[in-house]
Amino acid sequence: MSKTNTKVTENLRKKIEAAIKAAMDKGELPEGDIPSFVIEEPADRSHGDIATNAAMAGARVFRMAPVKAAQIIVDHIDLDNSLIEKCEIAGPGFINFFLDKKYFSEVLREIERDGDSYGCSDYGQGKKVMVEFVSANPTGPMHLGNARGGALGDCLAAVMQKAGYRVYREFYVNDAGNQIEKFANSLEARYMQIFDESFVFPEDGYQGADITERARQFADINGDKYVAADSVERKKALVDYALPLNIRRMQDDMAKYRINFDNWFMESTLHESGEVKAVVDLLTAKGLTYEKDGAVWYKNKDVCTEILLAQGKTQDYIDKLELKDDVLIRNNGNPTYFAADIAYHKNKFDRGFEKLINVWGADHHGHVMRLKGAMNAVGYDGDSLDILLMQLVKLVRDGKVVTMSKRTGKAIQLRDLLDEVPVDSARFIFNTREANTQMDFDLDLAIQQDNQNPVYYVQYAHARICSILRNLEAEGVKARSCTDEELAMLSAPEETELIHLLSSYDSEIIAAARDYDPTKVTKYVANVATYFHRFYNACRVKCDDEALMQARLTLCKATKTVIKNTLDMFNITCPERM
């Protein structure tokens, strides 16, 4: 909530506690600890602007009916200097408070004063956080899951920054291990088939057209130079050529999507630096590995069982999970992906990050517990690693699922989507559904330029405000600062409801950061647009009463600030004309 809102709420809590204490001192309430109670906004604003359950929460301490206790609290509460006009008792003992008109002017003044920084808070207290997202396999093009994960991850990082965290965005490039070996084998086969069609393509090879394209590009540059070369040399040359091109393609796609990572971390550096070997040695020194069938295994079952028992889980519950141990070093001496993953996340903590957040596909759910447990095993707090699991996304056109690109006739990739759909629409619409829900992305809706498209709807509200200000200024009416008396003229329900919504901007951002759910802010700004259009239709901005016109212009400008701050935060364009 805004500083004004926070100030009112904190002040009210003190006044309620003081009223309870005064009633206890007079013997009207029994002596005891002041109960913990909630202050919140009621769902129905006609019941008040703020409500508390203090009387009901204290029923056991007060030893009387909550309605009676509520009356005693009301009789002793001092609302002077509280920005609250009055209070009433409702229902089984709720106490509802109605805000003074000065409250609304204070909110508008705060927005006017803070401008671009309105919505910022110190909730995160500068805590250093890494958000790792997308991290697509560099052996092929990025897909639709990467499109959703990119929007969610980037906007989550943005709300956390706004909430006072020091946020770092990272892309983990799997440029080592089995997938690179498979990549090399696939490239080699496609290259050799250019000169010898009988060359056998590996059964587990990558079949994508992009592999054939890279092999052809390599052949165009090198001809048959590597046909007679040793296979190891040939594959190294192919990977050294193709992998950087694929990584550059991913970087270009992310840039087009307006995602700028602070770092592209290469898995290969973990192997080259010895960090993978070091983490296996560390686990071995702690007695958490054993050898079996020539491989080195990690005691995942023991580690996770200990964690679950500490959480109060029963052995029966744990047995049903069917926990298993994991291979760290294969019998051929090569480390597994999991070994590198442990080293990578330890590396993140080693770099001083206090909280790690990963955005993963839901198919990785089985990997969550074992990685968190591994962080405990290497000496860090596994609870400081949070993993946001993201469900599948389906593209829909004309109500039917779409799997092929109209342009290429092949499976739709991220770049195909961005060629067809405006980036603004993609970033906004992917953030209208929580990560843990499956999503249908409507291609028709995403390209519509009308109020059915949610990002257009919000952008139009901003453009409409700019138009109001521009047109009035052309008529010689320039917005100015208003007095408290002038702002107090904003008393219509459509005006006060909009101001109320604007005052909750900070709290929406904090809730989004706390719950790792940037969709809260997307939905919030869509509500701001709705409330603004409602206000605009009910309250004529240009009117004969100059003072009222200026007050309404102040409300227009405050709304414009909140919309712009949100779209800027999400790296979505904020047009002044549409």
Image (spheres, rainbow, N blue to C red):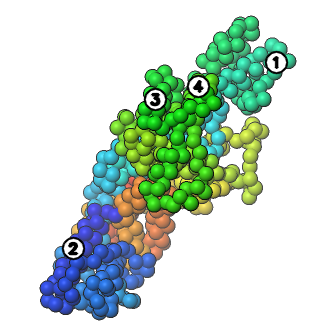
Q: What residue type is labelled 4?
A: Asn
Q: Quadrant of residue 449?
A: bottom right
Q: Which amino acid does label 3 sit on?
A: Asp
Q: Along the line of sight, which residue is nearer the eye, 562 or 319?
A: 319
**N-terminal-most mark, 1 or 3:** 1
Q: What element carries label 3?
A: helix
Few, some or many residues within 10 Å of mark 1 (<14, 14–19, 20+) = some
Query: x, y (%) of residue 78?
Result: 18, 82
- Residue beneath the point at 40% across and 73% down: 497
Residue where numbered disc 3 is placed: 281
Give the residue pinned by disc 1: 199
Disc 3 from disc 2: Cα separation = 55 Å
> According to the image, label 4 marks what residue?
334
Cβ atoms at labels 3 and 2 below 8 Å apart:
no
Q: Looking at the image, do the residues carrying marks 1 and 3 touch, with CB atoms under 8 Å apart?
A: no
As shown in the figure, which amino acid type bears the numbered disc 2? Lys
Q: Distance between the residues labelled 2 and 4?
A: 63 Å
What secondary structure is marked by label 4? loop
